[in-house]
Amino acid sequence: MKKLPDKVGRNIIQDTEFLKELSKCVWNLEIEAPEFEEKWNNVLVEFKLQDHDWLNLMFEMRAMWIPAYFRDVFMGGIMRTTSRSESENNFFTSVVNPHVSLVEFFMRYETALDAQRHCQAENDNESQEKFPQCKTELLIERHGSEVYTVSVFYEFQDEVHSAFYCCGVDELRKEDGIDVAIVTEANRRRKFKVLFECFSHDTTCSCKKFYRIGIPCRHMIWMWKAKNLKIIPKQYILDRWTINATQKPVLDISHEEDFIKNIREFKNKIEATKNVTLEDTQNVRSSEHDIEMLIGCSIPDEILVQPPKVSKNKGTGVHDGSGTSGSKRLKGAKEIAVGQSKKKTKRKCSGCGELAYHDIRNCPHKA
């Protein structure tokens, strides 16, 4: 979408409603794929762009980038992969850089994870000790404040508030023992179909927000309110959004008991090795000792492989091969001339006998 001005021309973007109409079509999360295709074609016909090669190419690969094709795919609220990538880059660049060694990277990586776990612990404490204020009298909202984390609850609370004050029913009927409601919203023409099964409390909505984000939508909450439910049905509470999410297993591992047993044995072995090493070094810890423990071997008595000598490049200083650079650096002819012109007095060169800004060491007449 950011490439539109360059692809279709800035005149049509600035002088018409093309970008506005196409954006309504592309970013609409409440329409199905056939409706999107119809709206896309209508926009292109209206602005006479139906033969545009780039737009037709984008339409051919629509299933890979148009949100209408991902409405029922769970993404946890992350619609753009760059958001997750930028978040990871920001996290890791604060503790590592491209110049650290592999061993140092692992050590800094552990430090970064410790900081992240500390932040997680603070958020867990806030969610467990603080209960946000409810905006309605619905018991479902109070139940949400008890099970969801603070940040997720605020999103859920917005849906509850809209269900309580903005949603109504246009039609209510039964089909094969299932309650069907056509839910409307204030100041909106679009209607949403909600299905509710009384025995299991299974609920589906045509907006598909729950399948996409994992938080019940306002239309589902309206149905639960109409059915006088006191709590959120358990099948609509995702563990990842709850206060106790980190206390539950993430993966369903077969032979779980054997797996845990092997992990504990491995942990005991590592701790035993660590204790022996600590006794040998008389409880003296150092960065070298930590590195030895990490890579599983000791520093050799004789070092055969040395760091390579760094070449002398212009502007990098004079290197002595030890990894440090001197205060001098190579200068260009222009920079030398400027520096000499700033000197106050000339001196007599013992080589050529002239009054100049050089001496016998750098005399231009020296053979």
Image (cartoon, grey):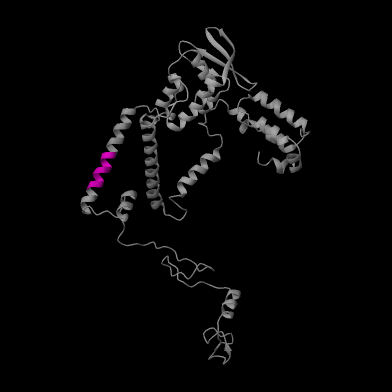
Residue 19, relative to residue 137: is it above or below? below
Is 282 or 241 nearer to us in this picture? 241
Q: Where is residue 176 in the image (x, y as percent from the top left)?
A: 54, 7
Q: Position of residue 131 (x, y in %)?
A: 40, 29
- Percent across and percent down for residue 69 are 61, 28
Tell me the quarter of the picture where residue 118 sits: top left
Q: Is residue 268 magenta?
A: yes
Residue drawn at x 47%, y 53% as measured from the top left: 98
In the shown orientation, is residue 361 left or right of residue 116? right
Q: In which quarter of the image is the C terminus?
A: bottom right
Q: Which residue is drawn at 45% across and 47% down?
A: 92
In the image, residue 247 above or below residue 236: below
Magenta segment, principal secondary structure? Answer: helix
Is residue 29 in view from this perspective?
yes
Q: Give the range drawn in magenta.
A: 267-275
Residue 367 visible somewhere in the drawing:
no
Image quadrant containing the N terminus = top right
| Direction bottom: furthest residue | 353
